[in-house]
Amino acid sequence: MNFDYDLFVIGGGSGGVRAARIAASEYGARVALAEEDRMGGTCVIRGCVPKKLMIFASQAGAMAAESRGYGWAEASAGGFDWPMFHAALMRELDRLEAAYTGGLDAAGVKIYRQRARIHDAHSVALADGRRVTAKHILIAVGGRPQLPGIPGQDLGMISDDLFTMEKLPGRVLVVGGGFIACEFATILNGLGSDTVLAYRGDAVLRGFDGEMRRHVTAQLDQIGVEVRLETNPARLDRDGDGIRVSFEDGATDRFDAVMFATGRAPYTQGLGLDEVGVRLGRKGEIVVDEWSQTSVPSIFAVGDVTNRVNLTPVAIREGHSFADTIFGARPRKVDHGLVASAVYTRPHELATIGLTEEQAAERGPADVYVASFRPMRSLFAGSEARAVMKLIVAAETDKVLGCHIFGPEAGEMIQMVAIPIGMGATKADFDAAMAVHPTLAEELVTMRKPSRRIGGEFAGKERGLA
Ligand SMILES: Cc1cc2nc3c(=O)[nH]c(=O)nc-3n(C[C@H](O)[C@H](O)[C@H](O)COP(=O)(O)OP(=O)(O)OC[C@H]3O[C@@H](n4cnc5c(N)ncnc54)[C@H](O)[C@@H]3O)c2cc1C
Ligand SMILES: NC(=O)c1ccc[n+]([C@@H]2O[C@H](COP(=O)([O-])OP(=O)(O)OC[C@H]3O[C@@H](n4cnc5c(N)ncnc54)[C@H](O)[C@@H]3O)[C@@H](O)[C@H]2O)c1
């Protein structure tokens, strides 16, 4: 059978763009891609990139305070000009979008700037009524913010809206305790909004190492975010030009804006998946095998829509591996087991790879090495903020099972640590590395004595603790 294309990609985000570009440029496949919104997807247009730039913007006050500690007695951030920053941000997103589009054009990918849906196992229906056939179809449509399902929730914002606000809210409620809630509470607070974070649990960032969760929760409080734990909104009502929030415990409060950061869900609605027989999981995610193949052999899926590990580098790796496997005759699977990540709170980020202390304790004896200290740079400027570094080491094999860093630029550090940990490094390997002094990261190679043993006593030979 003759197809219009070898590959049709639905979604021009992290996973889709990479797969399309590699299939076309490296392997000469005839590729088309449909994008219904802006090229680049969540990460580039309304996620990682604008978020991190807003994190940088939100640090001016803290940087000025630190400078005063270093003798710049008059240092002040002055007034923040949202329209000015916002215009610069939009220019940067335009530049990035053009670069993504240009990369696809240069690779010879045909771009359809419209919504697409699956018609059958080998064809796609475009919003303008055209039908296009392809030997393979890749679904890379990402996820969408999920609202909690309470009355009045439409009065609230989602993370997408934070990048298009006309002005900063005076008083804002952030609902949730995940990546987005923590990062945006940090941003809004740093830009000058009076910020309240309501989270239904007892410490933010469920699923992360327990000790580190407590540090992030405390830091939010220390920078001036009012953290209300075990608190959840029950309804929202308009109140003049603000929003009245009624909480489940009966309390009410008024805010200029409410932001929901209550998770994201795969964006599978209306894609025609049921009709063609693509199997979905409990959360609406597309079920795929280790090759990202769906239950329909000609249809593959990568990225957030598969709800495996919802991070940009993972979507990119999945898209690249798909292209290598199908068009390059180079079968490549993605290992989702050891993925490093960072939460960009400030002044300290939380970065992590591997097992948490709680997970390690369930698997058997392990030694936990913890260094907690006030970094030289902020200490000199009068800050009490503590950085914490933790290594979790299998008692039996000496292998480093997990690393958790709470400190300035922790994301940069975990990227480096991910290499030896991915290679199966032991604590002895870490110890053998000469420290770089004076740095924060040197703590990772100078922790000599474990702080505690977890997961029961090891029955075999005790490892040397000297
Ligand atoms: C606020 C925020 C901050 C984040 N920060 C980070 C971070 O710091 N680091 C990190 O690693 N990850 C971060 N993420 C997660 C990251 O953005 C996602 O994991 C990543 O973008 C997933 O890529 P994807 O290709 O699966 O989907 P997406 O990037 O979401 O791309 C999907 C694309 O498909 C398009 N589309 C959807 N349906 C159709 C259709 N039917 N037809 C045509 N086009 C369609 C959409 O418009 C979109 O452009 C963040 C996410 C958010 C929301
Ligand atoms: N720095 C990064 O790498 C980064 C940053 C942002 C987002 N992301 C990715 O995007 C994903 C989505 O981020 P997120 O913060 O939206 O999701 P999340 O899953 O990390 O957190 C969702 C939060 O909402 C809460 N919640 C869920 N339903 C609720 C309800 N009905 N009522 C009240 N609270 C509720 C949860 O308890 C949780 O605290 C992340 O899991 C991550 O994969 C990554």
Image (spheres, rainbow, N blue to C red):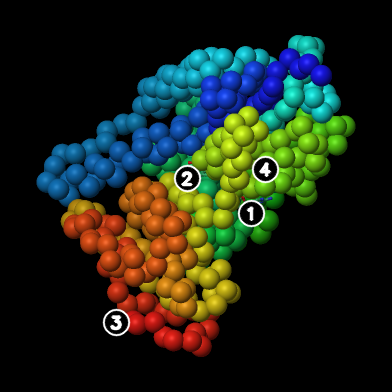
Q: Does label 1 point to a residue whose CB lies under 8 Å from ligand 2? A: yes
Name which of mark 3 and mark 2 comes first in the sequence. 2
Image quadrant for the C terminus? Answer: bottom left
At label 1, the amino acid type is Asn
Q: CA distance from mark 3 to mark 1?
A: 48 Å
At label 3, the amino acid type is Ala
At label 2, the amino acid type is Glu
Q: Is the residue under label 4 in contact with that under label 2 (CB below 8 Å)?
A: no
- The disc at residue 183 is 2
Q: Position of residue 137 (x, y in %)?
A: 72, 28
Name which of mark 3 and mark 1 comes first in the sequence. 1
What residue would you read off at disc 3?
A: 466
Q: Position of residue 23 (x, y in %)?
A: 59, 26
What residue would you read off at disc 4?
A: 291
Q: Nearer the viewer, residue 152 or 463?
A: 463
For marks 1 and 4, give the one nearer the viewer.
Answer: 4
Q: Secondary structure at mark 2?
A: helix
Q: Is residue 351 above or below residue 236?
A: below
What residue would you read off at disc 1?
A: 232
Q: Secondary structure at mark 1?
A: loop
Q: Is the residue under label 4 in contact with that under label 1 (CB below 8 Å)?
A: no
Q: Position of residue 457 (x, y in %)?
A: 50, 86
Q: Residue at x 45, y 40 (%)?
A: 188
Q: Residue at x 40, y 33 (%)?
A: 53
Please say whether residue 425 is visible from this viewpoint.
Answer: yes
Q: Secondary structure at mark 4?
A: loop
For marks 3 and 4, give the one nearer the viewer.
Answer: 4
Residue 123 occupies quadrant: top right
Name which of mark 1 and mark 4 comes first in the sequence. 1
Q: Nearer the viewer, residue 70 or 152?
A: 70
For marks 2 and 1, give the one nearer the viewer.
Answer: 2
